[in-house]
Image: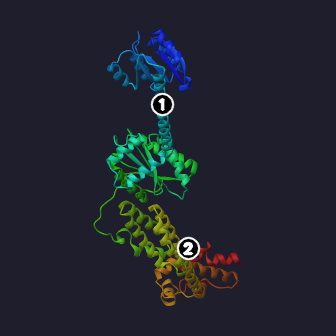
Amino acid sequence: MYKVMLVDDERMILDGISQVVDWRSSGTELIDTARNGIEAYEKIRLNQPDIVISDICMPGLDGLGLVEKTWLNFPRIQFIMLSGYKDFDYARRAMQYGVKHYLLKPCNEIQIIEAIRELLKEREEQNERDDFVNRMKQGLKKVLPHVKEQFLKEFITNKTYGTTDVEYYQDLFELPLNSQSVRMILFQLDDTHEYEHIFALKNIAEDILQSVLLSTTIEGHLLILLPEAECVETLIQDIEMVRTTFYKFYKLDITIALSEADRMVNSRKLYREMLQCMNHRFYIGEGSLIMMHDLALQDRDVALDLNYIVDEEKFCLLVKSGNLQEVSQEVERLFSNLDEMRLEIAVTRSYVLQLYAAMIRICPPEETNSFTKGMTVLTEMETLSGLKSYVFEAANQLTAGYFNNNMNRQSSTVDKMISIIENNYGDDELSLNGVANQILYMNPDYLGKIFKKVTGSNFSLYVNQYRIQRACEYIRCGEDVRVFELADRFGFSGNSQYFSQVFKKCVGMTPTEFKKSCE
């Protein structure tokens, strides 16, 4: 049942209409009556009827005043106006507040019921329209987040969108997209991840940044649009909080690109700039916040020879020599040059691949296959630091192999030299040059170096020590032999004094003293 209130300052009319009209047959009930506008408004405020049937001319607050006051505070209450005058000005003023039914006194029951039924029909139609609009709003409310995401994605990738589209969607979303400068933030997870990680990152970012206008996922990145911040430093702090909060829960690091401030219609340009920033992580490294001023791109008109950055031939010689320290220094220098020059990423990668190809050429045949597979790994590396780590490990592995082979060869050569010493220690002509030139046919300087490297002693000292060792063994056997005879027998022919000096230096006493100690 709809509630009706009757208002008239004439008692007879008030009682007559109250009793004559069959309210129930019209789907209504009369809930109250009032004798003037002031009394009526108080009862309207308390009871809020659906329909008010009111006279126009009343003391205190007339019918039109009652309509105006009610319409301001209770706009859904409908009025049927009664008047003894056929005055169009009254009707026109009443129509301003949505009053469509204006009955002249005296009016009968049929006219009032007909007016009520028309009002109720209008109300039901309005209710249906309201229900339809509410359903549409609820449906839109459910899909609106998806519409917002799709709009942002389409806007930065579809060149047909323009200022008109921004104005349309800002009205739809009730967002100030075209009236202020905006910034974009691009998030990229650095490790293998699931979609749930992007979803979680989106929720964390929107919670911390708060002023997010729009967000979407595009090509595995999370893109966020927000108003230009009054303080960029504060924004950067908030972005860092997003990173640390996400890492706390998922132990995944993020690379972040922050655009410059510009209008929404230029968002495609902002997005391209952020992609440039994201590519720049090749040099800066993963887990960084990168802005346009971090990019130091340099135009280079001529291609650079690899030797300008690293001497490939020298590098291969260092590897073959087994010199781990110098190889590491050369790799460090190469990548320092590349990082400083900041060439196009493809060019930088090509230089690294050339160096790696040089290592493949000098690697042992049994390791060629595994080293060759590394070329594929290097082409998929996304950062300069990753390339450096891989090349550094490969260079060390190759150098260590050469070092071990060199040591084995050197040990074999030194073993031959020691064998020569043991067989020829009594020859006073025994020397490094003689061994090198007449027996092993090798460079004496190189031979002397590897001999000292393996034994810890130079050649001549080792020979003299070995001679004294054998002389001591001979004396211990109890042979009665003089010093000059010992000198002749053990390689000091014709120089017994020198023999005695060397003997004392090695043993701590003269040959004569040693003989007595043995007796």
Q: Label 1 sits on what residue type?
A: Arg
Task: Estimate how packed mark 2 is, as few (under 14), some (14 to 19) or many (20 or more) residues with alpha carbons within 10 Å.
Answer: few
Q: Which mark is residue 123?
A: 1
- Say which element carries label 1: helix
* Residue matched to label 2: 456
Q: Does residue 314 show up?
A: yes
CB atoms at circles 2 and 1 under 8 Å apart? no
Position of the N terminus, as image quadrant, is: top right
- Name the residue rendered at 44%, 20% in the picture: 70
Mark 1 or mark 2, which is nearer the start of the sequence? 1
**Of residues 29 and 375, the one drawn nearer to the viewer in this rendering:** 29
Q: Amino acid at mark 2?
A: Gly
Kindly identify the residue that appears in the image at 43 percent across and 67 percent down. 330
**168 relative to 463, above or below:** above
- Residue at the bottom extreme? 438
User: Vertical placement of 305 versus 1: above or below?
Assistant: below
Q: Position of residue 388 (x, y in %)?
A: 46, 64
Task: Give the residue at x 48% y 10%.
Answer: 12
Q: Residue at x 49, y 24 (%)?
A: 113
Asked if residue 209 is positioned above or below residue 95 in the image, the reply reads below
Q: Where residue 412 sits: x, y (%)?
A: 57, 82
Q: Farthest left residue?
A: 301
Whole-Å distance between the Cαs marked 2 and 1? 110 Å
